[in-house]
Amino acid sequence: MPFQFKTKKSDGRRFKFSEWRSRWAQRVRSGSVFLLLGGMLASATPVQATTLPYQATTSAATVSMTTGQRAQVTLKFNNIGSQTWIKGRTATALYLYGDSTIFKDTTWLTNDLPGLINEASVKPGQTATATFWVKAPSTPGIYEESFLLSYGTNAWVKGSRAYVKFVVLKGVATTVAATSPAPGTTAYSGLLTEKGGTEWQFVPAGQGSVTLGFKNTGTATWINSGVNYVSLYTGRTNRVSPFRDATWKNQYQPTVMKEATVRPGETGHFTFQLKAPVNTGTYSEEFILAAEDKAWIAGATALLPIKVGDVSGAPPAAAAPSSPTASYKGMLMLSSAKSLTLSGSTRQGLTFGIKNTGSIGWSTLTARILGIQPASAATISVRDESWPTATDAAVAQASTAPGQIGFIGFTVKAPVYKGDYTVSFKLYADGQEVQDAVINIPITVTADGYIEPTPQAATTPSVPTNTGAANVDLSALPDEPIIRVGLYSTIDDKSVLKAVSGGFSLYQGGSAVCNFGAGESVTVSFDRATKIYRAQGPNCSVQSANFYQAWAPDLVTPLEVTDYNRPVSWLPGANDNKFRGKLELRYTPSSDLVWLINELPVETYLKWMAETSNSSPLEYQKALMTAARTYAMYHVQRGTKHAAEFFTVDAKYDQVYRGYGAEIRDPNVVAGIDATRGQIVTYAGKLAITPYYSRSDGRTRSWTEVWGGGPYAWLVSVPVPWDQGRTLWGHGVGMSATGALGMAADGKNWVEILKHFYTGIELQRIYK
């Protein structure tokens, strides 16, 4: 719908757009202009960042109808301004954003006025509703209209524009009674009851699985085969989702229902794969149920908020090319090997030549892993320690004009177990996906490689050797400290929690308020309007102005956040949504966000980080995790970085934190952490902050050289001969990961590695 601006003359007549534009120009010159754009009232002159008298928040809605059908729509608006809204045609009413619509019903007061708000008055902090009737047109399709609130004859409530999507299906016109239909009277209707997440996070080109559950609220039985089978469609007609995966039924249908039949009152499930696009950003993907060649299933829609970005260390993709005719295309022309035959865990270097068949020149080429087949075991991996990130095998400087060939080389590490595999890589040029440029490498592993034994947890970890620190009396040391990790800010102000095995309890102030058995879950939410926390589950319905915490009786059994989805890009089916310790939903007034916070011991926190691979050398793992422990303790001791948000570090930008899944996948890293328990880097007897990064260009940088300030005596430039001839990958201050790997390969122990990169430091154990 084209942009339409509404205002009124004093006699109630509408301005034409051309007439309004002329008067707008006059007001611009006088400095008194105000614009209504996208439902937001913005002043052309600077305003103070204070609460506006009339301001709202709202959300979108989807209405499914058949042609000619009438239906009721209810929109909600939160009053976040400083003035009370009063019901009335010349006060607070609901207007169409536009002059008219094909969805106008005979009950509307005018062509652009569906009705008034339902409440007589709505105070700041309260919620208004507006209920009105619409009538579907005779032509099926996907339509969108928007509505907004007035607070007078020619003024609009800021932020109140609400978008409504109408899904109109071909059908027999029906007349709806003056009251809402009773549940279950529609043949095909449904309700989303299981979503499996509130936020889906992917690395660019990453994959993950989604399961949706819909309750059959109609009168017809759903089937998954034959005529009128029930399947899941993308939410817009003739639209291919950017998250389409090769496993989908077709470009518009991700999957069909899993169950053979679902009777009224039962729940049907739909499991499908998503593959993220290469461009980072925030997406909103909608899916709708349909009975094939029969009807869309009314009310059965699901909206998935998805973030594509740096969730596992991969560099973000660059912005899309500005030229609409520009293209990134390529063709694999040269390969140093068409297939590999290796023993388990052995390495092979590879080189590839890719012809630029597009219209844009390339500056850099990136080879990013797509997947490994078969993906039948969690131990399958081809990542080599030389890779710059968990997903990128190499980033090469490859200046390549259209028609030329660019080269990229990297090393793969054979899977540990005997068998036949195929590993696939996708090429990116300057952060953009190169169409048709996929590298598939068949790998035959002739014999199992070396498999590290599963480490046994010691009841009392011994003092590590080669620490450079004097022996200490463990009984004189304090207990292990606790760290609080901000996992993520929720989208819908709630979290659904359950124990992975056994039961758990919900606590407040250290006292249990609800207990849950195996398989049971609790939904904890925060009501922004009343500032009240609520918990709802089996035999549990409580609310309080104070927050709740959930944990298992032993504080060791992990809890699962069932409405959070964080797939592991290189391990199909894995979901890092499990955490030991305590889980807490907490509203933070400073940021106006609701965070899920994980409270746990520092050593457990370290075991859940994703800073190195399980196959890296043990001495390197010890050095890296000691630096990571020192960084974490720096923030534990200071307690200031995220104090206003009630946690110590966040799970993404401070240190990459994956949760319980990382501990299971990386037993060797866990052993390295146990071997250095409680050890931190110190200078002159005090904790020394220990930055680290991916790779240097032959030397490190001093703190002052990169960030100014200082100087810090232990953070000075030192040579890194193991990185000689490479490009700098990171800030360059402190320890180079590839340099440390080179030292470990040369037989250096973890203390020698740390003392090389951090000048004049000592190691000290600071807790039991």
Image (tube, grey):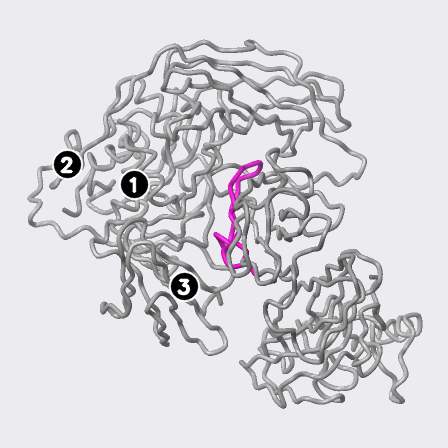
- Compared with residue 764, is residue 103 higher up or lower down, i.e. above or below? below
Q: Quadrant of residue 511?
A: bottom left
Q: Tag 2's secondary structure?
A: loop
Tell me which segment is drawn in magenta: 191-214
- Compared with residue 713, is residue 503 higher up or lower down, i.e. above or below? below
Pick the front one: 620 or 183? 183
Which residue has dot 2 on it? Answer: 469
Disc 3/disc 1 C-alpha distance (Å): 28 Å
Which residue has dot 3 on it? Answer: 523
Q: Are marks 1 and 2 in contact (CB under 8 Å)?
A: no
Left or right for 93, reference 490: right
Q: Are marks 3 and 1 in contact (CB under 8 Å)?
A: no
Within 10 angstroms of label 3, few (less than 14), some, or many (20 or more) residues? Answer: some
**Residue at point 42%, 35% (across, down):** 693
- Compared with residue 626, is residue 66 higher up or lower down, i.e. above or below? below
* Tag in front: 1 or 2: 1
Total labels drawn: 3
Dominant secondary-structure state across the stretch colored magenta = strand
Q: Tag 3's secondary structure?
A: strand
